Amino acid sequence: MNTVTQNSHSPYSSRITGTGSAFPQNRLTNHDLAKRVDTSDEWIADRTGIRERRIVRPGDPSEQNSSLGYAAALKALEMAGKTPDQIDQIIYATVTPDTLIPSAACWLQHKLGARRAWAMDLNAACSGFVYALATADQFIRSGQVRTSLVVGADVLSSVTNWSDRSSCILFGDGAGAFIVEQTHAQSPHRILSSHLGSDGDLWEVFHIPAGGSNLEVTPEAYSKNLHKMNMKGKEIFKSAVRTLSDYAVMAIEANGLKPEEIDWLIPHQANLRIIEAVAKRLNFPMSKVLVNIDRFGNTSSATVPTAMDEAVRDGRIQKGQTLLLDVFGAGLTYGSILVRW
Ligand code: UT7
């Protein structure tokens, strides 16, 4: 259930050299939501920490999943000083691709003109970006890839049940992207470790019943909203606090570090109360935790790269700092990555 990657004998390691993010223009505030379902700004802000989220305009080509990924990728490429023809590999973490065939990764390759790359999607729900970054790290350390574009992007508004007040308040749309490049094994700036896990026995706490090969979106399935996210919030909450804490400790201990040596914790943004509970368990001050859920809600695979990109660009993240990326998602899936920036 758990894989660990560290201390390999590869002469290479991976360095993140560019970050970028993009969000749709339209803001959906808690007050707007209170006009649709029986809720209030106060309840949502108190119970989740969310004040507003961004939602795509359906049908707008500039706000398709891969268009948000494209905008984020351009910013990451610019920061890294790279051009699309230098990308060897595109790994696109998403559960809401533009189309099931082809993949969002291929749409992005098309939009970028990244002709040398090979491209694939990866589905690990909200853990997707960490899974994708760990995968890119493996290809880079194997020597097969020199430059990888890793994207985490989701348009969760397309699978949100807008009549379910216990879930529709949580989600938003957005995209984050990293350029990851090959460097030498002992580079001071590199990905130090990754820990991934999953527990398919817990599939039922967060799933979309229809739209896959099990169940077509028939008129009946459609009328029952079976093509939308179905979530048992309380159960996910408990499991999330436990696993985020466990995977943070695994990363810290595997690298022989102490919690106080972590400069920034970058957790999946599902609920501010989950993040605060994890920080408390780890005895970690909230002043060292990156948070963007207040403005963007839960953007699934985009939460970690967008929160990190913001802190890189505003100067909170400084060269040489140690960053702990820590996620959970449907599946259930889990993971953490430790980075020396
Ligand atoms: O990436 C993973 C995605 N999902 C998650 O991470 C979800 C994790 N879970 C959560 O974030 C929280 O469980 C929720 C925010 C979903 C719910 O918060 P909670 O504190 O666990 O509330 P609850 O489900 O225990 O509900 C408490 C009350 C209920 O009313 P009664 O039965 O006490 O009368 C709900 O009906 O709050 C009610 N309620 C609401 N009231 C106003 C539930 N949703 C709302 C709402 N507005 N939006």
Image (cartoon, rainbow, N blue to C red):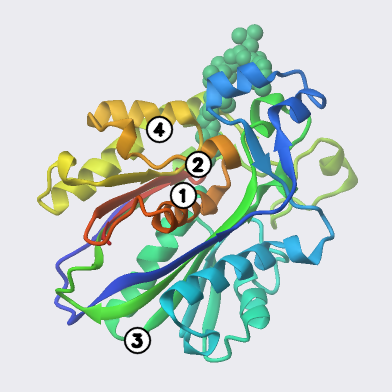
* Marks 2 and 1 in Cβ contact (< 8 Å): yes
What's the CA distance linking mark 1 and mark 3? Answer: 29 Å
Q: How far apart are marks 3 and 2 (CA)?
A: 35 Å
Picture coordinates of residue 154, whole percent (x, y):
62, 55
SS at badge 2: loop
Kind of element beneath mark 3: loop
The residue that mark 2 highlights is: 292
- Please tell me how crowded label 4 is: few (under 14), some (14-19), or many (20+) other residues with Cα within 10 Å: many
Q: Distance between the residues labelled 2 and 4?
A: 11 Å
Q: Identify the mark at residue 307; answer none if there is no mark.
A: 1
Q: In which quarter of the image is the C terminus?
A: bottom left
Location of residue 141 with respect to 198 vertically, above or below: below
Q: What's the CA distance linking mark 4 and mark 1?
A: 13 Å
Residue found 61% across the figure and 34% down from its top = 170
Tag on residue 144?
3
For mark 4, what is the residue? 275
